[in-house]
Image (cartoon, grey):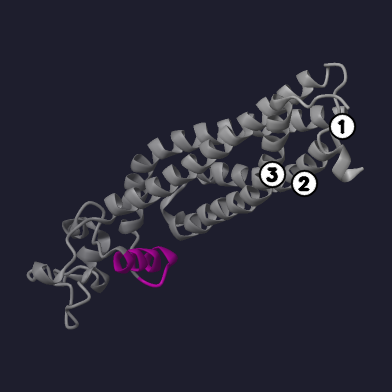
Amino acid sequence: MARLDCGMITSKSVLLLLSLIFLTAGVALGCVGGSFITAYEDYDAFFKDEHILLPAIIIIIVAIVMVLVGIIGCFVTIRESPVGLRLFLVILLLMFITEVMAFILGFVYRQKVVTEVQSTMLTIFQTYGGKNPETEMVDFWQNQFQCCGVNNYTDWTVTQWFNSTGSNSVPQSCCKPEFKNCTGLLSEPQELNTMGCAGIMESHIKDLINYTMIVILGFAIVKFFGMLSILVIACKKIDNGYQPLYSGVFA
């Protein structure tokens, strides 16, 4: 019986472990992409560029592929198929490149968040009033984040809604929750949330994008070690007298 190489044993064990990780990670990555899309649906009125969803879409596609790759990886590692190992290497390489692209896209769109949120919110706040979706969205986020206006509560004084009401007040969604009788009067600022919504939303979105980028980077590193393990196995198989590591178990 041929002597088993320590590097081969380690590489195969790592590759099998990574294949199992791919199965679990694929599910986790799919959840990350899904949460990004869900968050976008809450913020969609503030974004004109739907391409901001590209990183999340790419993540979900990668997640599906990862589950399949995990299954293939387990089979190929156990059976030690030369063709299967080469196919596995190509798949991992393509996934690695895709995740690098998603990481770059996430970085690019993170920089666009500030400009896009500010400009879009200014437009939406000007359309406030009545029963349109924009009004519901503004009220929802002012209640949710306990904020008022774009940069601060005085932004309302230059909106069409403020000038049309003539009440010298802001929407009641600007009121602090502890003041039940608040009517939004500017003469009673102590009852109002004075911080603007733009900064808070930018922070939440950036945090989500940063979290997504960290996850992508982590999985890319995992795939790098997977490719390295396949290369070690491929090189060792060239040696004479090599015997499959799991042949006695799965024969």
- Tell me: residue 120, above or below residue 103: below
Q: Which amino acid, mark 3?
A: Met
Which of the 4 image quarters holds residue 237?
Answer: top right
SS state under label 3: helix
Which residue is pictured at 13% across the width and 69% down the height? 168
Q: Quadrant of residue 15 in the image? A: top right
Judged from this view, the residue extending furthest toward the bottom is 181
SS state under label 1 = loop
Earlier residue among tags 3 and 2: 3
The alpha-carbon separation of the residues under discs 1 and 2 comes to 14 Å
- Residue depicted at 61% across the width and 29% down the height: 224
Q: Amino acid at mark 2?
A: Ile
Q: Residue at x 24, y 73 (%)?
A: 172
| Lateral position of residue 3 relative to residue 166, left or right | right
In the image, is 8 to the left or to the right of 219?
A: right
Looking at the image, the residue that sits furthest to the left is: 187
- Amino acid at dot 1: Ser
The residue labelled by disc 3 is 66
Q: Any mark on residue 71, and which?
A: 2
Across and down, in percent, residue 122 comes to: 31, 51
Foreground residue among 59 and 221: 221
Residue beneath disc 1: 81
